[in-house]
Amino acid sequence: MTQQNPLLSEWNTPFSIPPFDEIENQHFAAAFDHAFQVERANIDEIGNNKDAPSFSNTIGALDQDGIMDRVLGVFHNLAGSVSNPELEALQRDLSPRYAAFHSETMMNEKLFARIDTLYQARETAGLNAEQLRVLELYHRMFVRAGANLAGDDRKRLSTIMQRLAELGTEFTQNLLADERDWFMELSETDLDGCPSFLKSAANQAAQERDKDSYVITLSRSLIVPFLQFSPRRDLRETAFNAWVKRGENGGDTDNIDIVTETLQLREERANLLGYDTFADFKLETEMAKTPANVRDLLMAVWEPAKAAANADAAKLTRLMHDDGINEDLAPWDWRYYAEKLRKAEHDLDESELKPYFQLDQMIEASFDCANKLFGLTFKPLDVPLYHPDARAWEVLKDGRHMAVFIGDYFARSSKRSGAWCSRFRGQSVQNGVDIRPITVNVCNFAKAPKGEPALLTFDDARTLFHEFGHALHSMLSDVTYGFISGTSVARDFVELPSQLYEHWLSVPEVLEQFARHADTGEAMPRELLDRLLAAENFDQGFATVEYTASALVDLAFHTEPAPSDPMAKQADVLAALDMPAAITMRHATPHFAHVFSGDGYSSAYYSYMWSEVMDADAFAAFMETGDAFDKNTAQKLHDHIYSVGGSKPADVLYTEFRGSLPKVDALLKGRGLDKIA
């Protein structure tokens, strides 16, 4: 079987990249059967070892990459990027099965007894700093997964984890189905007043659906510019309502019952483990530590953001009334009139800007910044990948192989929405060999018609830099144990490397070099660049309100008794905040994938803002030197943030880089909200 199944055989490919051209859907079921068998045997061997527990024969043995890591790495990435009914069916079967296996491992009494013995003697075991950290984290993981529970509580927690895995998979697949199935077919006349790049993208989307006209889909890179530029208020309303109703349309893809059960099970899980609420459980291991600290941060930002948004709403309403629409400003009006206001206040027009942000140029810009900061170079690879749109590079530093980087940038119906960084293989040292990562960035940019360059908005380019910041965190990793490599850090620290990297997109010398017109090749004129940078905080009230409202709803869901009606609870939270009527949550509950596709960001959506407090302060370290690429500061950033994974607590890592932890003032100043009354 191992010889016939490419997932199980040796990968004689460049850098052991998965042999995507050989892997077929039917290979996964047999590969997982084999992987479960092998992994269970490995766990039993470690737990039943007659030798006294040592770091090497227990933690070191657990930390070795196995066949399960390999198969899961391929499967999860394909399920998110090139989904199909076969993969979705397998995902529904696999998620509870893997959750049961994980619980079985975490509650293996013999295995935990060995880990606990090592943990109790950790101070006298002669471990180095990294080994001590890894031991402590493994012990904490087992305890938080129920290793100390007994009897019915142990069985119940395992059942809960399996059901939560099922629910997360169902939530994700329902959301993908709603995003895949909805589109609005338009005529050329319906797009009167819209810029040519939007028409081209809508025509390309139509061709992908075998339509001869124009199509608006729920891909952010298509629907947002439509909401910005379409003068047809009726069509904007139709599109906006479809966008915000994802996961809330009744029928088989409705997510509300899934959310209700998920919240109830999370609360029960936390109670079984001795916590009052799920947020208390979840935040204990994060930088924030407590729900109160999270709420303090969010509320410190909420009032100035709401004041800014309300002031902007008054301006937008006047513009709408000038158009003869004497109604209240609605959510489907905001982006349209904000674009008009930006034109009036900053003389910026997206049609004028967008030709300067070619996808290929922005990729090169992100690579060039990585070269200036960290000495990385990127060599294109001609290897089979999982989709024709994906591309790959070998990443080198001083001639040393550091990683393989895969970029998958265009939206398609088989890909879940959003943008993310993942990996097919993480970094670790195994048997003295430095295993280098295979990292992937996945985005959902609008694809240009054949023969035309793909153009991004400035926000799209920022997303590209953000995800590449995550990729750098993975690719620069230089630790021994995979458990703490790359992005394996506290959730409210993991966004620091990505959000920090966004700042380099706005460095004038970067834009002068790479923001070149798609038709003429000329650099962006300095006066246009100045106008662009001057407007960076334009509409920041809106952006901050829609994000912070989502984070506060997430926090409320997990700090209070699980609601029987999540939508009523969402409404109550927003009413108590006096949410501006013309702004909606960035992620309404039925499509809040960060929180309900799994528990990664559950009660932790605030993490982006927590990290932003640090990223504003961290970039200031470069500005204080007068050089955005200052070599000494970049070396400190590499040594204390990007290369060290979770080898130390996050607050220690940041303090080693910067000298102290920042206050929220840095975030308010960075968003231009520090002077808002």
Image (cartoon, rainbow, N blue to C red):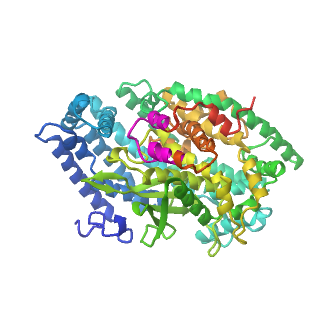
Residue at x 73%, y 40% (from the top left corner): 582
**Residue 89 left/right relative to 149:** right
Q: Does the magenta stretch include residue 63?
A: no
**From this viewpoint, which residue is outermost toward the left?**
50
**From this viewpoint, which residue is outermost toward the bottom?**
451
Of the 4 image quadrants, the one containing the C terminus is top right
- Residue 13 in the image: state x and y as whole percent: 34, 69
**Residue 349 left/right relative to 101:** right
Of residues 428 and 359, which is closer to you in this image?
428
Q: Residue 138, located in which quarter of the rendered image?
A: top left
Magenta segment: 633-656
- Residue 373 in the image: state x and y as whole percent: 53, 53
Determine whether 449 is above or below 30 in the image: below
Of residues 28 and 56, which is closer to you in this image?
56
- Residue 500 in the image: state x and y as whole percent: 56, 46
Of residues 274 and 355, which is closer to you in this image?
355
| Residue 230 visible | no
Of the 4 image quadrants, the one containing the N terminus is bottom left
**Residue 246 left/right relative to 57:** right
Determine whether 672 is above or below 253 in the image: above
**Residue 401 left/right relative to 222:** left
| Residue 453 visible | yes
- Residue 148 in the image: state x and y as whole percent: 27, 29
